[in-house]
Every structure is written in structure tokens, then in C-alpha cells.
Amino acid sequence: MNKQEKESYLREYALMKQEGKPFFPYAVAKDGAMAAVVMLSIILMSLFLGAELGPKADPTTTTYTPRPEWYFFFLFELLKVIKPAELVQLATIGVPTICMILLFLLPFYDRSPERRPERRPIATTAGIFTICAMGYLTYLGAHAGPPTQIDMETPPALVAQGGEKLEQFEAGKQVVTQSGCAACHKFGENGNDGPGPDLTDIAARLPEQAIARTLINPTAPMPSFQNLQEEEPEKFDAMVMYLSQLKGE
Amino acid sequence: MPDRHQTKSKYTTDRRIPGAFEGETVSRRRFMTASAHTAGGVAAMAFVLPSLAFAMGPIFEEQDQPWQDVGSTDEFDTETYVPKTITIASGVGEAGKSTVYMRKYDPQVDVEPKDQYNDFIALSTRCMHLGCPIRFVPAAGRFICPCHGGVYNFRGEVDGGPPVRPLDRFYTRVTSGGRVEVGRRFSVNSEIERFSPRDPGAPLDGIGQYLYPSRPSIRKLPNT
Amino acid sequence: MPKLKLPAPPIPLPKPLPKRPGAPRQTPVETATEAGISAVDWVDERTSLSGAARWMMFRKVPRGTNWFYTLGSSTMFAFLSQAVTGVFLAMYYRPDAAGGAYESIRYINNEVFLGEFVHGMHKWGSSVMVILIFLHMARTFFFGAYKYPRELNWGIGVALLILTMAMSFTGYLLPFDQRSYWATIVGVNINGTGPLVGPYLSDFLRAGPEFGATTLSRFYAIHMLLIPGIMAALIGAHLYLVAKLGTTAPPWLKPSDPVKKEEKA
């Protein structure tokens, strides 16, 4: 923005201001109405959602799944998405710091005098992209289930069938959860995306025998379940049966 | 004969000292300006520095970590980990406790040289990504972090996910009465060499140990 | 730029005429009004605040300002609500990690009259404030309101955004439940991943190498004294600059042509 543009803005603005209305009471009335709406929504949220207190802090736990408040979900998901250990600092300190600096310096690198959003395509696109990215990360963060349980639906055909098959399916699910498969594999919304492949629809890609073979003779770093097969074959069979039912959601 | 009379004031008017008036000497106004700044600075520092030092004191104060009894030697084997609760910060009751996973040293599994402090291996339950509580899953023989997807193998080394170094460990020793005691925490790099404890998220391989220096508040045992 | 003229100071009113004999007596309402006016006058004579109030309240706002322009003031309103509910929560809260903190929040929720309600207002108020401050920033961004001459005010606003997030972070350790504790551990460790200074920064936040006896009171002091103080000062500066530089007009509005206007007239 050069001197001429600055002066022309100030002149235009002074004219517009002269044509305007006094702040009090015209703008204050709107502000007051909005403040009342805000206050009302806070009160309603407090009344209906309350202020729940979770279980007391326990630093010795090994079963608790920490999750942040919703407005930090985007950061939480960012930390999950950036996998390589060398890039941890980028996710924790790097990206937030860069974003803060970019925000602070915005008026200094965006120096065009144009103010209409439709005539600032880069700025408007960047803004909308940022909002979408944060919204998407927040959504993912909100839906990230802990890797210590699996919330996928039991196939309805199996439920209808019931009986022994269903029991074996449930037993297999339990074995899979307790074996920590979800630490490396994704099951629907639970588990981690990697290092292992997504198992949500493993049955669509591998036949039952192949699943069993992979469990006994896996590629590193996946542990072998040969011991389980030898010592507790019924548990191993349940596990294979469970995995062979995962055809995706 | 040259004109000995000065044509310009040697005082202030022509020397661009703001606010100075004719007849006032530069040195006097400069002196007053300097003393105003100094007095103000001294007065401000007099309360800022002590309170800042007061708030930052804990950074430089070494915390003592006594040896704690966790059980007798026959409670632990080489096959699996046993969780034990120890106190890592005194004076806060339950909030100062932490869990360690313990097992016996196994020459077939462990790569680090054996010495007086690792008859028993004690792993910290803090994930080395950002400090979430990890959990040992016996079926897979692995440690799993519920937060951002860290996975560690049986030795506590990173198997996958974002953690930057193997799980922290604690010194252990065996008393003459056959009891196992757990001492200070120490961090290890991927070769299981001992380092002064670092916070989660601080890598120790390569340049990492210099980018994330050890702190005066917590140290490993000397000569280990 | 032609300097905008401030309204002229008021001309002192002529002294009231002496009462005519037989005039009706003052009603109590009139007496009260007069007393109020003279009290305000008394203060104004000694402070000259009326000029500042006039400058703030009767400045003109460009045409076309819409509901999007209320987001800033409602963020401030949410901050005030947080401040008030926070002060009252502090009357019952004990920053004691050994069990007192959790117990005191449980006591507030279960025993104190309207306790859970005020606690809930503080808790949900923080969410509302975070939403509002982001919306306010989005409005400023898309309307180009951060441009000349308002660059500095944008900077203050970004600082307020960061401080608001810092408030939320330091705030949710205080109830000392599981979520508080682990979120704080993770948050402090995130700070600790900054190269070179990180380890010392996290030692400073925790008051030691581990979560210890004074960590909670440290967070409490930062949450209720340090950050709110800075925020209040910055909000004051933000408001002053808004009043001084004026509310922006919506970007697609142009002043009506003065020549045409005269013709119309």
C-alpha cells in the first residue's frame, strides 16, 4: 500500500464515517442483543450439559486414554498424523509457531489495498482452506477411538445367525483387542493408521487361510502369533474367524 | 585577527537536544535524563529480578530421588513385565506416584552390558512421544500408547509411531536381603546407553542430545 | 487526512432562575434526577471523563455494519463472564494436588448452592469464548479489516487469541481429574520439545523435573492472575484502537458521491 492508496483509504473512510450513525445506541443495541444471546447459550449449556468431573487424576494408570478438550483436537490429530519420529518437533512446536508468526505478520505481507474478499482470491482461498483443514482435523480428532477397544458393528448376518458363530466372533474380537492389534492397525474408527495396514476390510482382501498364515508368519515388525496357536488354539481360531468377518463398514 | 567570539551556542539550542532551552548545559540535561532512566531501571529491576529468580528457582534445584523397595527378587521373571507403583515426587500423595514395568535382565533379550544397576529392568510408563500412559500388552509382547499411536517392543525400543526414543528406565539394585529397589530415572538412546533424564519428545540420537540438554534439576547417577 | 472534529465541549447551562412564588413543588422523581445529575457533574468536574465517554460512545460507525460486527464485543462479554464466574469459583477452590483440588471441585459441584451451575458457566463459557474469538478473527480476515491503518490492532488481537488458548490450557488442569492431569502432562511436554530452551521451559512450568507439589498452584496463578491481567490490558488497548481508528465499513460499500448527494438535496 503506497502513500496515495493510504490517503485515499483514509479519505473514503472519513466520508463513510460521516454518513454513519452514532455507536450509541445503534451499534450498542446490536452488541447488547448479541451479548444476551451469548449469555443465554452459556447458561443453557451449563444447565443441560453441567460441569461433569471425571475420575480423580491417577498418574499410575496404564489403562486411561487421554483426550484433550475439543478445541485442541486439531493439534491432537496433527500429532497423530505426523508419524515419523524425526518430525515430532515439527508437529509440536514447528507448525503452531509458524502459524502464529504467519498470523502476526499477516498485515505486513498482505499489503494490497483491496478489501473485498472476492477480489482477494489468494487470501480468501487460504482462509477457507485453513478453516476447512482445522475443521477436518478437529472432526478426525473427535472421532479417534482409543486403540484399546474396537467399536465396529457386528455384521447383521452374523447377529441373525446367532449361536456359536456369534460367540466365536465376540471371543475373537476380545482377543484382537487384548493383543494390541489396534496399536498398528486401524479398525474402523479405532486404532492407529500404521505402521500396519488398515484391517477394517481385511476379509475383502485376504481369504481366511491367508489371514491365519500371516498371523503365524508375519513380516517384521509384526509379532508372530504362533505361540498362541500352539498354546490356545481356540483363541487363535476365534481371532482368525473375527478377522475374516471384517468386510468393511 | 580571527573573531574569537563564538557565533554558535556551545550549549543546547543548536545541538538538537529535545526540550532543552538556551543557557542550560548539555551535560546537566543529559545527566538528569540518565539519572531518570537509571533510577527507574534500578527500581524496576529491584522487584523484577528477585521475583523472576524466585519463580525460576526450581529449574536449578536438584531433586533427590531415594531408592524405593518394590518387592523381593522372586516376584519378577524374564518372561513378562510386572507393574509396580513408586513415588517420583514427594509431598503430593497419589499425584506424585508413577508406575514402572519390571522384569529380570535376560541375556538373550537385552543388548546392553550388564552392571550393578540392571539386574532388573524397570521401564517407565511414560510414552516418549509426549508422556501419555503406555500399557504392556502381554499377547503381543509390546507396549502401546493410547494417544498418538506409539508402539514399543519388549525391550522398550520404538516399533512404530511417533516416539523419538526408547522408553525411559530406572536404576535398580538388589539389597543384601534379596529385595529389589528402584532408584532414579534415566533416559536411553537407541543403543540403550544411559543419559541424564530428558522429557518426552526429546530425541537422544545424533544431535538430539545437544539440542535437548540435560537439566540441573534431574541427573543420572555419576559414572554410569 | 482532515482531522475529524471532536464534538465541542458543552456550554455551561445558564443558572436556573429563582423559583417563582407559587410554583408547584418538585416531585420526588425530579429531585432524584437532579441529585443524580449533580453527582455525575461533581465527578466530571474533577475528571473530565464526559469527553472520553462522548468520544467513545458517540463516535460514528459507518453505514452497513451488520451482525458480524458484534462478534468482538460478545467475545469481550464472554471474557467478562469468565472473569466474574472465575472469581467466585476461586472462593471455593483449593490448588492442592494431594487431593484438595479434586475435593474442592467435587464440593462446588455437589454441595455449594448453584455450584455446578457457576462451574458449568465457567467451563462452557471458555468453549463459547474460543468459538467467538475465532469467528471474530475470521470476520476481520475476510473483510480485510487488518489492513492499514489497523495492523497494530490485528497484532493485539492475535496476542489475545493465543492468550485465550493459553487460558483454556492452564484452566483445565485445575479440576484435577484424569483428563486434566494427562492433558497437562502432554501440554507441558509439547512445550518441552522446543530445542535448547524447551527442557528449561517445561521445568519452569512444572516447577521441577516431575509433576510436583507446586505445579498446580503455579498453573493456578498463571490462570487466574498472570494471563487475565495481560488480557485485560490488551483488551483495553484493542478497544482504544478500535475507537480511535473507527469500525471498518463492510468492504463492498463505497461512500456515496458527495456531488450526487448535493444534487439530491
Image (spheres, rainbow, N blue to C red):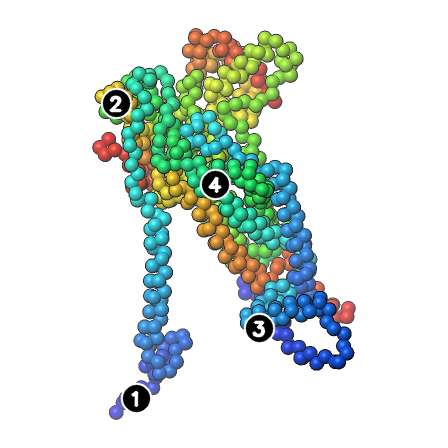
* Element on which disc 4 rests: loop
Report crowding for label 1: few under 14, some 14 to 19, many 20 or more residues within 10 A (C-alpha).
few
- Count the labels in the image: 4
Name the residue beneath numbered marker 3: C45
Report crowding for label 2: few under 14, some 14 to 19, many 20 or more residues within 10 A (C-alpha).
some
Name the residue beneath numbered marker 1: B5
Going 54% across and 65% down the picture, which residue do you hit?
A3
Which one is nearer the viewer's eye here, C225 or B6?
C225
Quadrant containing the C terminus of chain B is top left
Q: What chain does mark 3 sit on?
A: C
| Tag 4 and tag 2 share a subunit | no
The percent position of residue C121, horizontal first and vertical second, equals: 58, 44
Tell me if residue A66 comes above or below residue C64 in the rendering. Answer: above
Q: What chain does mark 2 sit on?
A: B
| Label disc, if present, on residue A58 of the rendered structure | none
Question: Is there a contact, CB below 8 Å, between mark 3 and mark 2?
Answer: no
Going 61% across and 69% down the picture, which residue do you hit?
C39
Q: Amino acid at mark 3?
A: Glu
Tell me if residue C16 comes above or below residue B59 in the rendering. Answer: below
Q: Is residue C145 visible?
A: yes
Name the residue beneath numbered marker 4: C174
Q: Amino acid at mark 4?
A: Leu
| Tag 4 and tag 1 share a subunit | no
Q: CA distance from mark 4 to mark 1?
A: 77 Å
Name the residue beneath numbered marker 2: B174
A159 horizontally vs A110: left or right: right
Q: What chain does mark 1 sit on?
A: B
